Image: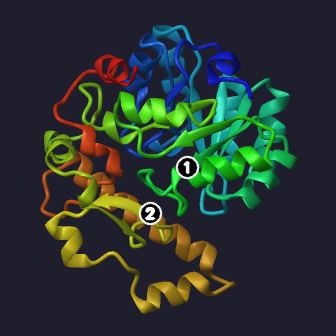
Amino acid sequence: MKQLTEILGIKHPIILAPMFLISNARMTIAAIQSGITAAIPALNYRTTDELRAAIREIKAAAEGPFGINLIVNKSNFRLHEQLQVCCEEKVAFIITSLGSPKETINKAHASGIKVFCDVTDVKYAKKVESQGADGVIAVSREAGGHAGTASFRDLIADLKANCSIPVISAGGVGNKATYEERMSLGVSGVSVGSIFIASEESPVTAEYKQACIDFGAKDIVMTTKLSGTPCTVINTPYVQEIGTEQTWIEAFLNKNKRIKKWIKALTFIRGMKSLQQAAFGHTYKTVWCAGPSIEHVHAVRPVKEIVSSLL
């Protein structure tokens, strides 16, 4: 199985994972300069012009590969224009999430762009492999954000036994020991996100960064209220107040075949607005997305230092 270092031409097989609202050009530049790669969610930019400008900013400041994360299900009404920008600007790779990547794979490959697909089980992994994916990102239950249900060990073993394309582990890497543990299982690389929330280059508030220091793995809970899809957040008093399960009417509407696409989109928009307010503003409504690897966050540090701590 090819290593991520060989696939992308990087020094260390690590992706600074795409994090909604958090990942930006500054973090990506720092990642490239640290010998790893990074990806940014296209949805972090309000317009495709802003996305294009960010890609060009990174290319002008750092020489190395980086990628863009695309939501490829029907809730992303801007998918086609985002994909077009990625192809025109020739990013090194695309990470797909939450939907069928077939169209994205075909168009990306036509532009010489590699595609890695988020997967949480073997069935979906085999599907994207048959569609031409260059690798799968094994999103385990230890991951932050939209986590999976299987442990990293079980998921990696299943994917390696049933797929022939590279497997990248996502979830739970926060220090050298956890990084080496994942690599010892024969993966091509790792995708690491939550420990970079408290980086100097991260654009979020000091309060959000401090929460990653003050809280730990035991404080991470799963909620369906943000996007309709299970998502991990820090169990702040506000999260405890509003609960982590959708109301019966929300759940009912999400299952209605005629309108569920629109309901999911509205749920996503509303949930992401809550995350944005908490990430960049001072509010008691603190809904901070993070994974259990914040257990290993003890200070705000530059990206380069966080990368070094893994090696």
In-front residue for pair 58/124: 124
Among numbered discs 1 and 2, the one appearing first in the sequence: 1
Corner quadrant of residue 8:
top right
Query: Residue 259 location in percent, x, y?
Result: 63, 82
- Tell me the kind of residue under disc 1: Arg
Residue 7 sits above or below residue 86 on the image = above
Q: Quadrant of the C terminus?
A: top left
Q: Which residue is mark 2?
A: 269
Residue 64: x and y in percent read: 56, 12
| Residue under the point 68% across and 84% down | 257
Residue shown at 81% from the left, 37% from the top = 107
**Residue ID at (47%, 35%):** 181
Looking at the rendered structure, the kind of residue marked 2 is Ile
Residue 78 in view of the camera: no
Q: Vertically, is 217 above or below 309?
A: below
- The N terminus is located in which quarter? top right
Badge 1: how crowded within 10 Å, few (<14), some, or many (20+)? few
In the image, taking residue 301 as reference, residue 161 lies left or right, namely right
Q: Which residue is mark 1?
A: 153
Comparing 159 with 271, the one in front is 159
Q: Is residue 64 left or right of residue 269?
A: right
Work out whether residue 180 or residue 238 is closer to the camera in this orientation and state it. Answer: 180
Query: Which label is found at residue 182?
Result: none
Question: Is label 1 or label 2 in front?
Answer: 1
> Marks 1 and 2, Cα distance to the nearest angstrom?
33 Å
The answer to whether residue 9 is left or right of residue 2 is left
Q: Secondary structure at mark 1?
A: helix
Do the residues bearing badges 1 and 2 touch, measured as CB atoms within 8 Å?
no
